[in-house]
Image (cartoon, rainbow, N blue to C red):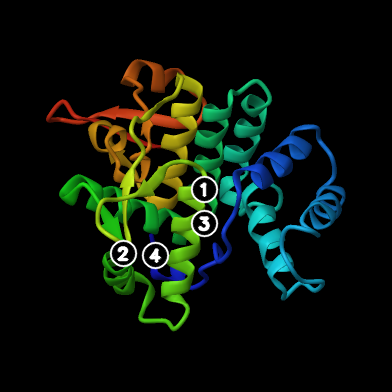
Amino acid sequence: MSAAARTTIGFDRTIDAEWLDAAAARAARGQPTAEVRDFLWKFLEDLVPGDTNSSGRGKTLTVLTRIWLAVPPKAERLRDAALQCIGSATGEQRIAIHWAMAIGTHPFFYDVVTNVGKLLILNGQVNRSQIKRRMTDAWGDRSTLERTIQHALRSVRQWGLLRDGPVKGSLIAAPRRIPVNDEITELLFHAVLLSHGSGLPLAQLSSHPALFPFDARLNSTKLRQGRFMHVVRQGDQTDFVELA
């Protein structure tokens, strides 16, 4: 991903899964964005303080809007595909769909959870200071960086995908990875490729650290049958996946 894509943090609020469900449900019904925003503004009234766009409630609405409503143009196909399957999804499957939308629309969130996944693989646990050191390289030593990392981690914890670790201030992964079906796996792969900014070998995509909460597997045959990705067999017999 280019440095330009990392200029705006965007994901700077703690977001509850219930709020994501509310936004997605109304978007899936085809309600106009303005109507959904108005509903969410009232929905958040007793949950997040503030009465202006720059308040906590206003900033929370901005994050929800970017995830499910006014998404970046490159993520519109992802959002449309996600809306087609979220209505019939179980609670766990909805979390996976929200995850795909969050990492596909917010490079900052993608970078945080990618680093979380890497550290969980290395150490089995993670803390905020470790994430900040890694994030500073890409995002700079901003005064807001630690606070926004905390919002991202609190969101993931609220979604049930991280929990308190044995060491004070540490976090560990949930006891089990959530299995997801082929349709949702395709959404997750699509989202990773969007924020990664280029194609990846299928093996790397399947084990990408940003997907640490999920058991997401899809072979090259199934991917070739999908709508959004090309699979190219390289000379070393590696399957390379890129967005169509």
Q: Residue reaching furthest left?
A: 236
Q: Nearer the viewer, residue 30 or 141?
A: 141
Residue at the image point whose x is 36% and y is 78% from the top = 140
Residue assigned mark 1: 158
Mark 3 residue element: loop
Q: What's the mark number on residue 131?
A: 2
Residue at the image point whose x is 36% and y is 22% from the top = 218
Q: Nearer the viewer, residue 60 or 231?
A: 60
Mark 2 vs mark 1: which is more N-terminal?
2
Q: Which quadrant would residue 129 be assigned to in this image?
A: bottom left
In percent of width and height, residue 80 lies at: 65, 35
Mark pair 1, 4: CA separation: 30 Å
Apparent side of residue 2 relative to residue 183 in the rendered image (left or right)? left
Mark 2 residue element: helix
- Closest to the camera, between mark 1 and mark 4, is 1
The N terminus, quarter of image: bottom left
Figure check: 189 above or below 170: above
Q: What's the mark number on residue 106?
A: 3
Q: Nearer the viewer, residue 154 or 131?
A: 154
Mark 4 residue element: loop
Residue count near mark 3 (Cα–Cα under 10 Å), binned few <14, some 14–19, many ≥20 = many
Residue at the image point whose x is 43% and y is 74% from the top = 145
- Closest to the camera, between mark 4 and mark 2, is 2
Mark pair 3, 2: CA separation: 17 Å
Mark pair 1, 3: CA separation: 18 Å
